[in-house]
Image (spheres, rainbow, N blue to C red):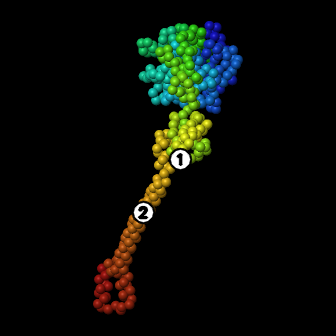
Amino acid sequence: MINTNQYFPVYNSLTQTVGIDYFGTEDRVYWVDLDKTHSGVYSVRLSGKDFKAVHTTGLKSPEDLAIDWMGGNIYITDAELNKIVVCNIDGEFCNSGLFEELDLPRGIVVEPSEGRLFWSEWGKRPGIYTAGMDGSNKRHLISDEIVWPNGLALDVVSNRLYWSEAKYGRIEFLDLETNHRRVVLQDKIFHPFSLAVFEDSLYWSDWITYSLDMSNKFTGHNQTTLVREMNEHIMGVHVFHPLAQKLSYNPCLSHKCSHMCVLAPNKGYTCVCPDQLILSKDRKTCQQMPATIATTTTEMVTSSPIVHKDVIQVVTRQPKSRIFNTESNTKSSNKKSLKVKSVTKDVTPEVTRHPDIKASNSEAETDPSVSNMGWITLLVAVMIVAIIVLLITVIIKRDDYREVRNVLYSRTDQLKYAVSLQNPLFRKAFRRQADEEEPLTEDNKSLHEGDKY
């Protein structure tokens, strides 16, 4: 409690709670719990009773969440999915397609009265972003001098958006009317993580000092440490007061959406469907996915790599994470529809690798003449490879022959020189042998005496 400076645990069995928010209408605390095996969103009453697992499937690395107290939805940032997932308040229906292609999203806040939200990203283009709560009108608000934006806090009274910057160790705000940007705190904080705004005060958690601190939201003065933990990071920070979640005109109260209604800018709303369904032409009713693959048996879908020419394919962006209901008409004479009630994530390999394959390409795959041409092409390729190998072998052998011939020629020349009279050793040996065989006469005696000199 802020007024009494007392704090107490609400719920203990947690793994790693990161983001937290409060839904005043139901008196419930919501948080994201990060775990290697079962990350999800959980909820409990402020008294610590009535614990609920709100959404525990599909999330990989949830970072933060924000409660839409008017539309009754939860917005969850997931840094591994790179998406903002939207679920209704009890987690029965969830949509992950409104905010796609994000880059390491982290903090998030919503402004239901204006139908917009804000979030921070750590990726290649770090900064602060905004969009309608239905995913429309996405804009990059802050892109300069920002690297590690963490928590966000919206001050509705002054129409300012606060954020913490861990790289430079500071807290800043942006005036949403004038786009004026200003640094509130910089030299007295180290690694700010989460933050909240209430009345004239600013609250934040610091990972270096393991503390929860507060200061004046306008000047940054009167900095005070409220709580300091022993080597434990304080993660999410949220301040609640009934006036902070005012109710105004809510277009979703009179909606005719079959599953989910999300607020939109200009006091509007948008009907949204869970991931396994799509919106019909009336833009209000959700229906089953159109046909992806239709065959006479489901075994043909998972085992055969051939795309049949009688099937029109529709491949979604995430075929691995969804189950589709399929329905398609064949060209048989009875014009009868074939229905496959479920197609698992193991779709045809060709469809997975090449989502742009069309039905017309499948005719060439099943044509016998095309198959014969394939065999002929393969045979020609093998013959060309054999000819190349033969030529290489001949060239190598020719080079070896030349080398052997050169060696023999050189050896022959050496042998000729060795047994010729030009070689002094051979000449002496030859004359010595001649002396032994021929008696020494007056003629050759002078010759031998001349050799000595």
Question: Where, by quadrant of the figure, is residue 54 drawn?
Answer: top right
- Are there few (<14), some (14-19), or many (20+) residues within 10 Å of tag 1? some
Pointer 1: what residue?
A: 306
Q: x, y percentage for residue 356?
A: 47, 40
Three-letter code, disc 2: Ile
Query: Residue at horizontal 59%, vertical 10%?
Result: 241
Callout 2: helix, strand or loop? helix
In the figure, 443 relative to 324: above or below? below
Q: What residue type is labelled 1?
A: Ile
What percent of the width, then of the height, locates residue 357?
48, 42
Rendered image quadrant of residue 261 = top right
- Local secondary structure at mark 1: loop
Q: Nearer the viewer, mark 1 or mark 2?
A: 1
| Residue 333 in view in this figure | yes
For the C terminus, the quadrant is bottom left
- Asked whether disc 1 touches disc 2, contact meaning CB atoms under 8 Å apart, the reply is no
Residue 298 x %, y %: 61, 42
**Label annotation for residue 387:** 2
